[in-house]
Image (spheres, helix red, strand yellow):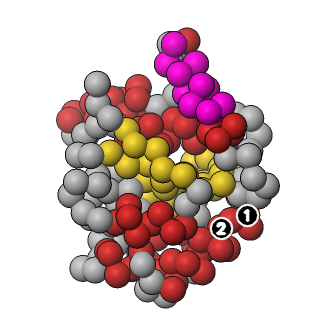
């Protein structure tokens, strides 16, 4: 039980909060400003985050950038599209029972999987049940229709994806997004 408690505490420290240092908060605010000026079109903006390999901080960055946007009053959603090794639920310390995969196969309705205001104004869709065919699910017509619906509800959608060197899912997801941010460990 102690290890799980320690993991929760470590995860909380990674997310932007009242104890985050000024330079960390300001770095995410600078990223926010860069995104705003890079995507000047009207309507919802969808941004995918990926990295070359696992462990580079992509999920943490995805969440912290979304928190930075939510602080401006924007309607923000994080979608965990890593249907192999989901991480968003762990960082938010929420269950991954029903999520994206469940909606894509028609097992759940969208309203059943959106978790409202999980952290500082950010809504979340977890990955859901780990499917045997993640690539087929994210390239499906169901995914295209889901993204259309979500664009009508949110100002910004941040998609956490698997590392690009491991699988090609990010390449498939680019048809749904307005931009991709690559996270690179220094």
Per the picture, the main secondary structure of the magenta-coloured stretch is helix
Q: Quadrant of the N terminus?
A: top left
Q: Are marks 1 and 2 in contact (CB under 8 Å)?
A: yes
Q: Which residue is drawn at the image coordinates 29% and 37% (left, top)?
A: 56
Is 36 part of what is drawn in magenta?
no
Q: Is residue 97 visible?
A: no
Magenta residues span 23-34
**Which quadrant is home to the C terminus?**
top left
What percent of the width, then of the height, locates residue 68?
62, 33
Q: Is residue 79 left or right of residue 84?
A: right
Q: Residue furthest top?
A: 22
Counting from the top left corner in percent of width and height, residue 181 is at 46, 44
Q: Nearer the viewer, residue 164 or 88?
A: 164
- Residue 12 seen by the camera: yes
Give how far across and how far down residue 178 sits, in percent. 59, 56
Crowding at mark 1 (Cα within 10 Å: few <14, some 14-19, many 20+) = some
Left or right: 164 as drawn, with respect to 108: left
Is 165 located above or below residue 128 in the figure? above
Looking at the rendering, which quadrant does residue 184 occupy?
Answer: top left
Q: Residue 146 occupies which quadrant of the picture?
A: bottom right
> Mark 2 = which residue?
150
Q: Which residue is mark 1?
A: 153
Residue, x 48% and y 50% (percent of image)? 180
Residue drawn at the location 55% of the way across and 78% of the way down: 144
């Amino acid at each position: 039980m102690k290890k799980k408690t320690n993991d929760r505490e470590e995860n909380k420290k990674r997310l932007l909060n009242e104890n985050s240092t000024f330079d960390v908060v300001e770095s995410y605010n600078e990223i926010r400003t860069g995104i705003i000026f890079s995507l000047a079109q009207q309507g919802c903006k969808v941004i995918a985050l990926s990295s070359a390999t696992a462990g580079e901080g992509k999920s943490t960055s995805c969440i912290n950038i979304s928190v930075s946007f939510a602080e401006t009053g924007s309607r923000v959603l994080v979608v965990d599209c890593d249907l192999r090794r989901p991480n968003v639920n762990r960082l938010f310390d929420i269950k991954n029972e029903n999520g994206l995969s469940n909606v894509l196969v028609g097992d759940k309705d969208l309203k059943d999987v959106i978790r409202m205001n999980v952290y500082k104004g950010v809504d979340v869709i977890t990955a859901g049940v780990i499917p045997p065919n993640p690539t087929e699910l994210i390239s499906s017509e169901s995914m295209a229709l889901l993204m259309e619906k979500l664009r009508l509800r949110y100002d910004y959608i941040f998609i956490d994806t698997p590392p690009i060197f491991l699988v090609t899912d990010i390449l498939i997801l680019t048809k749904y997004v307005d931009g991709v941010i690559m996270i690179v460990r220094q």
